[in-house]
Image (cartoon, rainbow, N blue to C red):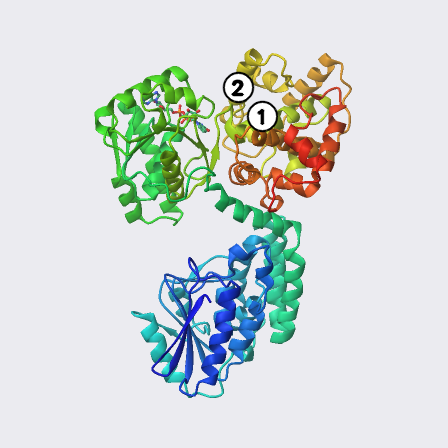
Amino acid sequence: MSTTYNVTDGVAVIALDNPPVNGLGQSTRAGIVDGIAKANADAAVSAIVIIGSGKVFCGGADIREFGSPKAGAEPNLHVVIEQVEQSGKPVVAAIHGVAMGGGLELALGCHYRVVAPGAQIALPEVNIGIVPGAGGTQRLPRVLGVDAALQMITTGASVPSDKLAKAPGQKLFDRLVEGDLLAGALAFAKDVAAVRPLPSVRDLSVAAPADAEAFNKARAELAKTRRNLEAPQRCVDCVEAATKLDLNAGIAFEREVFEKLVTSDQARALRHAFFGERAASKIPDVPADTPLRKIEKVAVIGAGTMGGGITMNFLNAGIPVTILEMKQEAVDRGVGIIRKNYEAQVAKGKLSQDKLDARMALLTTTLSYDDIAQADMVIEAVFEDMGVKSQVFTQLDSVMKPGAILASNTSTLDVDKIAEVTKRPADVVGLHFFSPANVMRLLEVVRSKHTAKDVMATVMAVAKKIKKVAVVSGVCDGFIGNRMIEQYSRQAGFLLDEGCTPQQVDKAVEKWGMAMGPFRMGDLAGNDIGWAIRKRRYQEKPNMRYSATADKLCELGRFGQKTGAGWYDYEAGKREPVPSAVVEEMLVKHRESLGITPRQISDEEIVGRLILALVNEGAHILEEGIASKASDIDMVYLTGYGFPLFRGGPMLYADMLGLGKVVEQMAAYAKNPRDDASFWQPAPVLAKLAAEGKTFNNAA
Ligand code: NAI
């Protein structure tokens, strides 16, 4: 059983003991029920304390049970909470560290709750596409009031216990215990042991909000901030129900909503993202107990756009950084931008001046390689040029201490070749950050054929420390993300050839859920980047066909927001895209030159071609072992490319569509003479899975 039971001084102590977070797995649930029964049967016991062993009270459901029969095995959490609530002797929850999801619901079923300061309190279920399922939406408003409960339940955000304990009128916590929690809980339990009747959250009523429109306003606001997501809306329904129904009827309502959501596509997608993020950090052939190299000092080469952002990640995590540049002006400019970024955060109240000072104090600069020789890891972010990178890595090889990790932020170059410039290729790895590097969560970790396993394990751990979602990619042109986006952009170009406007394409995929359509994205990133890549492609792959529209746009000098004009026009100083007559004229002439009569293209076709282009290229990436699992590809798209979370990433989307249907649609696209029929040949792994009726993601 994953609980322990002891009687101390007339108080029974049930300690949840299911590391790492005391998840409410079947044996923990059974242990609580047993403990309550035992304590009630023992005349020497006058009260009961439920506490967590280790660092937390309880993190909620045991995620290892998800999808297994154990998850629903008796006693389920409803039964556990019922037993606690109906105990004839008072039950006190003693909370420290974390009380989340089912853990908080369990505590709400207790007669009393005492808490240590600094515990994180949350109902995070909304983040996996469901509502709390064991009374949380009904009991939390009873103890915190509608406004605070609604905020917590619809966002899933954690709130520190001391803040909640000090909120006026709150009935969540009966005592804030500074110092030893168990001792405080035992003392409290003895104080209340004889009090009858036993108090219950069940007996509290919920005041309806003062503003009769409060719930509708919350729904409207969430429709904007949590666009397309079903669960936040249903959370509002449940809290509203708490103001109208008694507890039993409210719980029945919550249960019905829960059952509907838990089997929905959205919940499946959000669960996939939740597990995908955890799975991404595991590398099949690198054991979890691989010894890590110590990373206490970092050097960054180049203080440009990427170097500055990369540096901020480490300063934020309290890790000292030395930036090396070629000239003092470049150092000053780079450091100036870092400071300005922090100052903007201070101005918005997101960072204190003290923290700004502390972070800047961790930063040093130099023009000499000798000053970085003792760094544990160095990240190169100089110009994207093999000659320049080779020089930098040769220098690094000659000065860096043995065992230092040498990383490159290259977005297109061959990391195997960069490694081979040095005499220590096993220490070299690609760390492909995304711009702005201090904001974007994605980090592609590029594993060269030389990279040592402990280097991989170490950089994955470092990525976690700087709060990135790290996904491992093999070496190939564009790695996972950019290699796929190239096919997506190529389709977007063909759609222009055939009759679409940039705004039509952008609107269609944005309505479908993408954060930004391909043309707005091009204008933001700079259309010249794609232009340079295509020029290289025309040499390397002369048979690969592209629409000439993007080249024509660049020939007009329309590189995007940075030149004030791209696929769209931009008013001076504004980022709002305005449909462009110049582009429209260019497209008309372009179609005329090819003898194309433009046709009406449906949103369905636009979305289908763009997204399935990602899917087929993703399948090739999987086939070649560039990504080790489909969920890694999904994580790249969810965290780095604005792919809608509620669709779970391109590969899960294909799974949900059905791979048979995917292959069928591709065959239809292949018949379009304006498209590239050879691209639409399904990758062998896709064809095979489709034929076998299988999916990319086994566990989805
Ligand atoms: P950038 O042009 O803004 O900055 C490069 C910096 O490196 C400049 O400050 C330059 O003075 C310095 N530098 C050049 N040669 C040097 C040398 N030998 N020693 C020391 N410093 C040197 O370029 P950006 O955009 O920051 O790109 C850097 C790298 O990051 C490139 O490899 C690029 O492909 C990659 N990258 C860029 C992304 C982007 O969105 N800009 C995204 C992901 C990767």
Q: Nearer the viewer, residue 573 or 652?
A: 652
Q: Quadrant of residue 44?
A: bottom left
Disc 1 to disc 2: CB gap under 8 Å:
yes
Measured along the vertical axis of the image, is residue 215 above or below residue 173? above
Residue ranking furthest to the left: 370
Mark 1: few/some/many CA within 10 Å (<14, 14-19, 20+): some
Residue corresponding to mark 2:
533
Of pointers 1 and 2, the one earlier in the residue sequence: 1
In the image, is residue 65 above or below residue 191? above
Residue 349 - label: none
Helix, strand or loop status at disc 2: helix
Residue 245 appearing in the image: no
Three-letter code, disc 2: Ile
Specify whether tag 1 is near ligand 1 (CB below 8 Å). no
Which residue lies at the image location 47% right of the left edge and 83% below the top edge? 40
Q: Quarter for ligand 1?
A: top left
Of 475 and 140, the residue lying toward us: 475
In the drawing, does residue 595 fall left or right of residue 551? right
Question: In which quadrant of the rendered view does residue 131 lie?
Answer: bottom right
Instruction: Kindly identify which residue carries mark 1.
Output: 486
Query: What amino acid is found at the position of numbered circle 1 in the picture?
Result: Glu
